[in-house]
Image (spheres, rainbow, N blue to C red):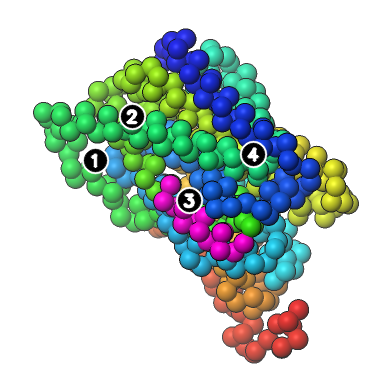
Amino acid sequence: MELTLEHVLIMVATLVFVIGGGIYAAGSVKSAEGYSLGGRKSGVAMVAGSIAGTVVGGGATIGTAQMAYTMGLSAWWFTIGSGTAFILMGLFYARKLRETGLETIPQYLRRNYGNKAAEAAGIISSAGILFSAVASCLPGIQIIGAVLGTSTVASAVVLIALVAGYVFFGGMKSSGVGGILKMAVIWFSLLAAGAAAVLEIGQMPDVTAVFPAGHWFNMFNHGAGSSLASFFSMIVGVLCTQTYIQCIFSASSPKVAATASFTAAAIVIPVGLPSVAIGMYMHAFNPDVLPILVLPIYLIQHQPVWLAGIALGGIMLSIIGSVGGLCLGVGTVLTKDVIGKAVNLGEGKKLLYTIRFVVIGCMALACGIAIYNLDSQVLFWNYLSMAMRGCGVFLPLTIAIFSPRSIAKKWVYASIIISTVLPLALEPFVALPVSPLFVGLAISAVMLFVGYEKRWRPIPKMQQEM
């Protein structure tokens, strides 16, 4: 991948513009709540920008192009699933969550199921979110190494520094402002580049020979069951992810939270298509490139310098924003619901600084995992992450929202642990007939049904009012 000086200068200017906007916004952050929730004053644009700016990361851009390079149109499932989840969030979850005035998923679970269930959910969901951050670190490290000619470790250090500039100082405020600017850059540059790829593919005289319709233009080309499992895992994972729900909690009102969810869906669903087109184009015209670098190589070799530089900056911003937003979610949960329960951090500067440094620790850990798995598929980590979060947390959270305090605490706690650990532990040794996510959800459903107290007796009115 040979970049010219013009490529690098335009890319750097794009990064400085967006990250500088986030750092400028950080000047108004003076408290832990301002850092993690933007002071609960965010409007539709800020909330939608935070959501879209986090979910559109390495998976939605480089990972989608990487998979489309070998699988075709079915790589679009990632952003379709994410966007569908945000539509469902806007319809059923956002208002109810924002009305509580809480800050984290474990806080919501603690209100309904007690401390043990909340702590277990916090640790498990944090591990799952960390794997999503790994998915964005993988291409980030590769691109930085290709641009700067640095070693893998040095590239990871540069990535951490860029992410820190994006989210370390301003938290949700920086994430919102940066998300808005980042999505504007990505929409403009990737849609232009993707349109050029579509036109080139359409003009190929042997397009049907290169892309047999039964495979390349088939959304179910690796099996309907596998495709729908990927789609469903995205929906389940997104709906119980702290990072996105934290954005909902930051909204100025329940109505704003719901509207922002729909706005994010409208932004996210189509953004995967340009990467799909580019991946398919590269399969036809550059079949020997490293799959993870399909998107940046296309931009450098097949697009004007000015567009390639902006788009490369947008890709790096998608990676930086995703890692930053995800690590912010992990840092908030671990600080508020794990560290904060063991050590009295108060509500002032000590709490603010602790969240910031836990966020940095999460970034470093995600980069470390990525370094040892550089050849892995980006979307593998995203789908694993969604399954891990969804198995144990999705059903308890959903039931807590729509039927509060209706399940015995011990059964919820057991469900969170067993439905997460058992499917993932069995998969390397047993050929499961379906995705581990479905196995975990089935286990969770059975255990929660057994512990469903309303099945046995009505909950006393006094308990309902607690």
The residue tagged 3 is 264
> Is 452 or 57 nearer to us in this picture?
57
Q: Who's the residue at 25% across and 23% down the image?
A: 285
Q: Who's the residue at 65% across and 89% down the image?
A: 458
Position of the C terminus by quadrant: bottom right
The residue tagged 4 is 174
Q: What's the magenta region?
A: 253-267
What kind of residue is marked 4? Ser
Q: Who's the residue at 50% across and 62% down the image?
A: 90
Q: Give the CA separation, mark 3 to mark 4.
A: 17 Å
Percent x, y of residue 290: 39, 23
Q: Give the CA separation, mark 1 to mark 3.
A: 28 Å
Residue 216: numbered disc: 1
Give the overall secondary structure of the magenta segment.
helix
Nearer to us: label 1 or label 4: 4
Q: Badge 2, how many Cα within 10 Å: few under 14, some, many 20+?
A: many
Q: Give the CA separation, mark 2 to mark 3.
A: 22 Å
Mark 1 or mark 4, which has the lower sequence index? 4
What kind of residue is marked 1? Trp
Q: Give the CA separation, mark 1 to mark 4.
A: 39 Å
